[in-house]
Each structure stands twice: as structure tokens, then as C-alpha cells.
Amino acid sequence: MNSHNKKTAGKLVVIAMLMFGFGFALVPLYSLVCDAFGINGRFLEIESGEFTAVEGERQGELLARRVDKDRTVNVQFFTTVNQNMDWKFKALDKSVKVHPGEITEVRFYAKNMTDKDVVAQAIPSLQPSQAIKYFTKMECFCFTQQTLRAGEGREMPLKFVVNPDLPKNIGTITLAYTFFDTGLKAKAEQKKNVALVNQ
Amino acid sequence: MSTATATHDQHDHHPTGITRWLFTTNHKDIGTLYLWFSFIMLLTGGAMAMVIRAELLYPGMQVVDPNFFNMMTTMHGLIMVFGAIMPATVGLANWLIPMMIGAPDMALPRMNNWSFWILPFAALMLVAPMFMGGNFSSGQGPAFGWTFYQPLSGQYDKLAFFIFAVHLLGLSSIMGSINIIATILNMRAPGMTLMKMPLFVWTWLITAFLLIAVMPVLAGAVTMMLTDKYFGTSFFHAAGGGDPVLFQHVFWFFGHPEVYIMILPAFGIVSQIIPTFSRKPLFGYASMVYATAAIAFLSFIVWAHHMFTVGMPVAGELYFMYATVMIAVPTAVKVFNWTATMWKGSLTFETPMLWAVAFVFLFTIGGFTGLMLGVAPADFQYHDTYFVVAHFHYVLVTGALFAIIAAVYYWLPKWTGHMYDEKLAKIHFWVSAISVNVLFFPQHFLGLAGMPRRIPDYAVQFADWNFVSSIGGFVFGLSQILFLFIVIKTIRGGAKATDRVWDSADGLEWTVPSPAPYHTFETAPEIK
């Protein structure tokens, strides 16, 4: 009887441990689903490696061949910094009117207000979510981590194209950027980023 | 020689005083410990609810500061879910399952002792930060809501207390569940086939499997939070490429089965009580078992209905909406079966029956508002409003808690050997049943009018119903002190209970003397 109970308990412990693993398996599973459906703003090119700045450039050029001059889309920019982060961060162009297929460049400005070097990462969020896959970035300060020395300020570019296939009912796209402090130490050079841009 | 044999035959010998409780491996002792622990937690969490309702009595800030208010809503939720409802049902399982299936004890008695004794330490660790910060009013307890959504919870600087408390609570639940499953599968009396088991045993078997499946996922979620916070990973940390929305998915993958973990044992309790006082066997026993299993299965595939507004594709919203609404089918089977059990029965309304009937009626109200919330387009209006608060308090207070109180009145004579004071118990029921509706029903109106949940202050248009709700809350809270008094009074004395206690009570637990001896069914009974 007793060994019978131990056997049952043993099997159940294995199930519990497998489910603990399953919790972690949800992480890559979630990325797979989001990438497959192009949802949840997962146009984060930083980690995936599949979509590089070079690839963005190439796709943008392709889209630029089919400029739709008859249509105008309003693109708005919105900026915030995460709590506990003392940076000034603003869009120098608050909003632009663009034709789908037209390559547009806008500028942002960030300034480190602290007396310490900070490595930060800008995370984009785009509304409405149906527009996410129709917004192609060719160059973005969000592709890499940004290091600002104490008191340093910098202008940063964003080059993008709105895909001419954008659903007709969408007239305004809002792009919000939030800067997060990565907590990393500023190095002389951000080697990882250099590698990524050169790919 | 003869004296030695005599003492050895005396099976009731066990250590006395505190060591009896510390070292006990007896399922009845451990059941009692669980039940008292959950009662203490109920009163603690209830006191926090009183602070919340006191602050919300009038618009404006009166009683506490906003952070303390947030701490109260957070701790109230965590304590009620993990400290009151879950341990109470585990306590009932410990007391009743061995007696109901004719087993001498739980399958793994030493582990049973551990399952319980982890709990007080987990609870202490959970509440400890509330007392850090110099004085009580500037306590540093968690204040990010019981769902501890990222990224807010990631910014809490005493996060490790919370995380390890959750780990311990999870460990306790998993060990308890393993024990319950092993007991039910291996230790049934001869002739007690699975489909002859009392429904309370069935619902707990399924609940235990749910617990083993989802508590480890919760443990995984908090472990990811831990490494994000202290070891530089980025599961949920946006700056490192993680995603806070992922947290919501992992959390609700645990969280939705969790709500059934709290309600399925309640279904079992009510399925035991209603036939007794209807003097008819339960209508549709087999369909009850299958409905329970169906609810358990569906609970795994509906989690994202808690996050309709998070920005899912329409296909996802539709899927989660249809799957969610489908749960109404097995749930309705249960409600119809309870009603059909009462139909043309010789009903009497002793206190346990009153609570059980109130459960059926009020839980169904909570079920209907659940359907409303499950409809994705409508949910955009209700999301994070008091409508949600009203919904889950109808299913958890008038649902789970009412069933647990019903169970206490139903089996208390078996546990103590005394009848409770029927007059006081009826007063307790009527005061609670009326005040709980005064407390929660107006919250539907507040939610529909747009009052958000988890706020310490509100626009004056919400003042009247909040006042009514708070008055109901104070009365409901006070009436549980009466419950405590009735329970203590019953333990200390009262009319002698017969073995069967209720004239048409059915089940093995009613064949043993009242109070139930320390050891029961050392020789397994024969089930025909």
C-alpha cells in the first residue's frame, strides 16, 4: 500500500515539474505566436536578428516604388521616459503628413539630465495595432541601445515608410516611444550594436 | 504485560499541547489546523476589506493614504485567495475525504503535516513588509494589485518577500494536492468505485489535478520576476526585449484555472448538502461528474478573456469569447441539477441548507455577470471597473465562501459532537445574506456607470452607491464575528449530536460516531 502511494506521488511530482517547465516554455511560444501574427508590437528588431537595419532599408526601398500620392496619412509621435529615469526626451516633429510609400525622416531629441552615464533602450508602441505590419522602419534609434554621457544631449533619426497596402480606414498612426534605463554600464563602445548595424 | 497491551490498544493516544499540533500526521488534526488558519486569514483579509470600504464610504481621502489603500486591496486579494478560500477547502478535504471514502488517513501523512506547516510561514513572509517602514501607516507591503502585473510589480523593492511567499504557498498546495490524489486513487474502501464516490470527493480530485497543473506555472512566473529583478534577465522587462504582456498571459494561464480551484470544491459541498435536506438523491450524478471535468478542461483554454483590452487580434478575441461562453454549458448543467434535486423534495431549511440554496441563487448571479464579461465587445466597457469587482465577489464570496460556511455548519456536529445554536446560526445567515447583497449588488451599478476598480477616491457621482455598499460591507464583516462565536460555542458544548446528525444524510462519514473518533475506518468498510 505504502509503495503504491509513493509511486502515485512520484508520478504527480513529475507532472508538477513538467508544468514548471511549461511555464518557461510559454516564453518562446509567445514570441512564436506574436511573430507569426505580427502582433503586439513585436517589430523589435534588436533581439530577433532576422530583421536587421539593412533589411529594413531594403524593404523600405521596395515600398517606395509604389508611392500613393492620392492618399495622406497622419503620423503622430509621442514620447515618454520610464519612471525613475531623468532624461529629457521629445519628438522634434510632433506629427507629419505622409503619402504611403514615401520615405520620411523625422528627428527626436534626448538629453541625459543626470550626472551619470546611462545606457537606455527605446521601446516603440504603435496604435492602431492593425497598422503595425504596415509601418516599416528603415532606420531607428530604437534599433540599438543609446548611451548618453552625463549631461549629453543628442538628436536621433527615425526613417520610415508607410506601406501603401495600409487598410483604407486608418488615417492616423500614433507611434509612442518609451525610454527604459537598461541598467547596463556605459562602455567605450557598444560592441553588440555595432555588430548589428554592420550586418 | 496486560497493561502494556492495554495502552497499545488505546489508539487515541497522541502527544498533547502544542506538540500534538506541530507533529501531527492525523488527517483530522491537520484539517482542523487548516480550517483555523483559514478562519484567521478570513478575519485578517476581512479587516483589510473594512479599511477599503471605510475609505470608500465618502468621496475624498479620509482614512488612509493612497499607497496604503493600494496595499490593502492587494493584500486583501492575496490573503483571501491564498490564505482563506484555498486552505479552507484543503482543510475540508483533509477532514472529509478519508472519512467519505472509508480510508484510515491520508495517503502521505507526514507530507500532509508539511503541507500545512509551510502555510503560516508563507503568510508571515507575505505580510512582513507591511510592518517595515517605521510605523504601520507607512508599511511597505505589496501595493500592485493581487494580479501583480508587470511592469509595476517589478518596481517594488521588497519583491523577494512576495516571490518566496508565493513559492511556499504553491509548494504547500502542490503537496496537498498530491496527497489528495494519492488518497482518492489508492485508498478507497473495497467496492467504492470512482462513480460511487461522493461528489465532494470527485470535485476535489479534479481540483487537485488543476492545482498540480497550474501552481507550477505560477511558480515559473514569479521565478521569472525574481530573475528579472535580481539577476538581470528580461522576461518581462521591455528594455531588454521582454514583454510585460507576456506576464499577463503566464499569470492568467495560472489564474483562470485558479478560480475553478476555488469554486469546484464549493460545487462538491453544495452537491452533498442539497440532497440531504431535499431528502432525495442528487439529480444527475454522472452528469455532475462530467460537467466538473468539462469545466476543468475548459478552464485551461480561456485565460485571455481577462485581457481582452490588451490589444489582441480580432480572431483571438473571438476565440477566447466563444471558449469562455462555452463554460456556461457545464455550469448550467450543475445549476439545473441542484434545482432538479430540490424539485418535489421534502425540503427543510436548516442552516446548512439555507447557505447552500443562497449559494445556488447568488452564484448564478455571479455566473451571469461572468457571461456578460466574457463577451469581448461588451467587456471593453466593463474592464477594470467595479462591475468586475461585483462579479468576482458574487462568485467568490456568495459562491465559494458561502459554500464553505455551509460545509462548516453541515459537518460541525460530526467534528465536535455538538449541535450548533440553530437560532444564532439562522441570524448569522440572514444578516450575512442580506448584507452581502447590499455590499456587492450596488457595485454592479458603479461599474456600469464607469467607476474604476483599485482607486481610493472617486467622482462624487459615485458617492451614494459607495455609501450603501460600505454600510453593507461593515454589517457583513461584523456578522462573521458572530460566526466565530457560534463555532466556539459549538466546540465548547451544546446539544449532543447523533451519529447521523441529519435524518437523511448519506455517506460513510455519518456512520462513525459524533464526534468522529481520532482514528476512523482502520478496518475498511464494505461498500455494496
Image (spheres, rainbow, N blue to C red):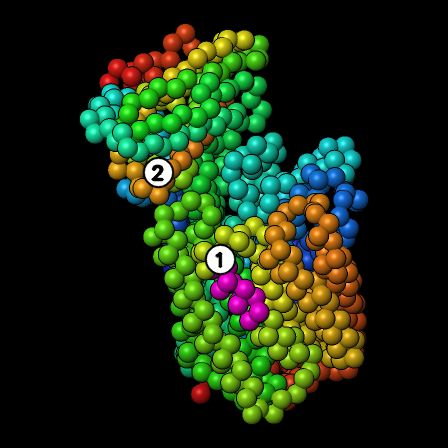
Residue occupying the point 51% across, 38% down: B150
Residue B225 screen position, x and y as percent:
49, 37
Magenta segment, principal secondary structure? Answer: helix
| Pointer 1 local density, CA inside 10 Å: few below 14, some 14–19, many at least 20 | few
- To which residue does mark 2 refer? A131
Residue occupying the point 61% across, 92% down: B346
User: Mark 2: which secondary structure?
Assistant: helix
Magenta range is: B363-374
The three-letter amino acid code for the residue at tag 1 is Ala
Residue B399 screen position, x and y as percent:
59, 67
Residue furthest front as drawn: A70
User: Mark 1: which secondary structure?
Assistant: helix
The residue lying toward the viewer, choosing from B345 and A36, is A36
- The circle drawn on residue B378 is 1
What chain is tagged by disc 1? B
What chain is tagged by disc 2? A
The three-letter amino acid code for the residue at tag 2 is Ala
| Pointer 2 local density, CA inside 10 Å: few below 14, some 14–19, many at least 20 | many
